Amino acid sequence: MIDSFQRGRRSLIEWSLSAVQPPGESESGDMALVRPVTNGVLVAAVDGSGHGREAANAARIAITTLKEHAGEGIAALLRRCHLKLKGTRGAVMSLASFDGERNEMKWLGVGNVSGLLVRRRDRPGIPRKGILLKGGVLGYRLPALEPQTIPVFRGDTVALATDGICPDFAEELDTDTPPETLAARLCARYATGRDDGMMLVARYLGWNT
């Protein structure tokens, strides 16, 4: 049996997470998930609407839903979360699903959880690509869902960041710095201080690239 994170001793991705919380808040509504699926890994960043306990409750419902159904497609996952979040504060999220057999990534966001792919310098194609974000709030308004599929290569780096992180972080995202260092540095440097902030950085290693 092949583990979705590893084939033999080789990992499909390496990743790290960093978060900040403004003073006076006891709970964060920003949560993340990295979950093995068939032939790959699902990566998610969730931001519960508002602040405090109710935002955290909405985010937990979304994360639990993603865990239970992680093997489904991105559009199906977003629809499930939308249904589960009805009657709550709602949440926005961005999902990226890496396929280690095809060397592809499917991704899509609902709301304002930003996402950026940076390619290794010696790889073809556009060097930087942002995630497609669709307007809406899961639990309240579900937009049309059309995930993008793009090729990924060993060394490509993806970052997902909630709106407590200034989008200017994109200027310093690279493919050389270890994800742990990148996530911590970018989160600390670009946190707005006005909201929960979370930065998840994943580097694609591939199984056959």
Image (tube, grey):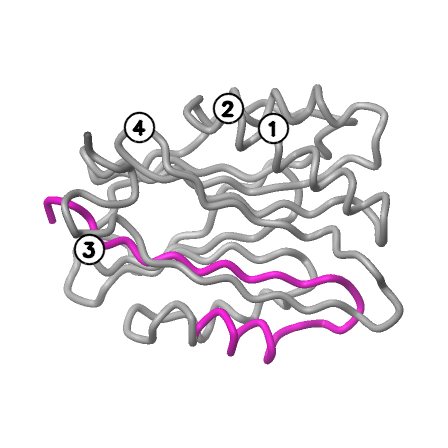
Considering the numbered disc 1 on the image, is that residue within a helix, a strand or a loop?
helix
Quadrant showing the N terminus: top left
**Amino acid, disc 1:** Thr
Q: Identify the mark nearer the N-term, 1 or 4.
A: 4
Mark closer to the chain start, 4 or 3: 4
Residue at 83% across, 31% down: 88
How would you rate the neighbour count of disc 3 (Cα within 10 Å): few for under 14, some for 14-19, many for 20 or more? Answer: some
- Left or right: residue 96 versus residue 187 is left
Q: Earlier in the sequence, mark 3 or mark 1?
A: 1
How packed is label 4: few (under 14 Cα within 10 Å), some, or many (20 or more)?
some
Q: CA distance from mark 2 to mark 1?
A: 6 Å
Q: Which residue is mark 3?
A: 154
Asked whether the beta carbons under mark 2 and mark 1 sit within 8 Å of each other, the answer is: yes
Judging from the image, what secondary structure is the residue with disc 3 in? loop
The residue where tag 2 is placed is 69
Measuring from the top left, give residue 35's x and y in whole percent. Answer: 43, 40
- Circles 3 and 1: CB distance less than 8 Å? no
Percent position (x, y) of residue 70?
47, 29
Which residue is at 76% across, 73% downward? Answer: 193
Q: Is residue 1 found left or right of 34 in the rendered image?
A: left
Please provide the residue range marked out in magenta: 182-209
Residue for badge 1: 65
Q: Residue furthest front?
A: 1
- Quote the CA–CA distance across marks 4 and 3: 19 Å
Amino acid type, residue under disc 2 in the picture: His
Q: Which of the marked residues, 4 or 2, is nearer the chain's N terminus?
A: 4
Return the residue at label 4: 38
